[in-house]
Image (cartoon, grey):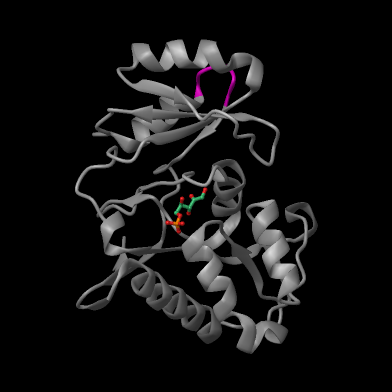
Amino acid sequence: MDQNQLKKAVAEAAAQFVRERLHDKMVLGVGTGSTANLFIECLAPFKDQILCTVASSEETQRRLRLLGLEVRDLNSVDEVSIYVDGADEANESLHLIKGGGGALTREKIIAAVAREFVCIADESKYVPTLGKFPLPVEVIPMARSHVARAIVTLGGDPVYREGFVTDNGNHILDIHNMEIRDPVGLETQLNQITGVVTNGLFAVRPADLLILGTSEGIRNYKI
Ligand code: 5RP
């Protein structure tokens, strides 16, 4: 199976996971990216049984509405039952790097609210140590240089994602060449730099379940 087929397989498995847990107050959080887009397509057969969704990006909101699903503002729901999203990297503790698509802040907010956070990914994303994928950091535009200098003192090489503006009107710095040995510590440290909105480490709130697509079939990892 190629990477896209593995993404399709995990999208279907996550849709089945949601289907088995349907209840009349189901609020579904939906992530951003190519794997999340495949998951959205898998919702079609039971979309009428989902009370509403919350979206981690404008693009995901557009896709959900196109399918006929109701999308609500996170402030107008009491809870998020399940949040399903992809990742750029995942380790055995279900710590993640996310934000390759630039939606990390809204993704992290929905993950924080969700009762269950399900990550879907193909096997290329499963790594022993996080950090080969450049770690995205969302910054307030006027703080970009200040944050970049602070990242250098932490040992990383920040690269400005030129021409990209997040859905929140901010900029992204991608940190290269940083082997992440302490994901919880680094996530916390980066978030303390003035001007950082958030960073793409999901370790303080890791996934609850990782559905990984491998050439030998689907593997489920839980912590
Ligand atoms: C977007 C993300 C995505 O989940 C991540 O980039 C994975 O994307 P894809 O499913 O296209 O490989 O965090 O901000």
- Residue depicted at 60% across the width and 15% down the height: 143
* Above/below status of 178 relative to 36: above
Main secondary structure of the magenta stretch: loop
> In the visual, does 93 lie left or right of 158?
left
- Which quarter of the image is occupied by the C terminus? bottom left
Res. 117 visible in picture: no
Q: Is residue 97 left or right of residue 67?
A: left
Q: Magenta includes 194?
A: yes
**Where in the figure is residue 165, as x and y percent of width and height?**
64, 34
Q: Position of residue 221 (x, y in %)?
A: 29, 66
Q: Nearer the viewer, residue 37 or 81?
A: 37
Q: Nearer the viewer, residue 124 or 181?
A: 124
Outermost residue toward the right?
76
Question: Quadrant where the N terminus lies?
Answer: bottom left
Q: Position of residue 158 (x, y in %)?
A: 41, 22
Asked if residue 223 lies left or right of residue 82, the reply is left
Task: Give the farthest residue toward the bottom.
Answer: 45
Q: Quadrant of residue 174?
A: top left
Which segment did they paint magenta? 192-196
Instruction: Tell which residue pokes out farthest to the front in this image.
Output: 163
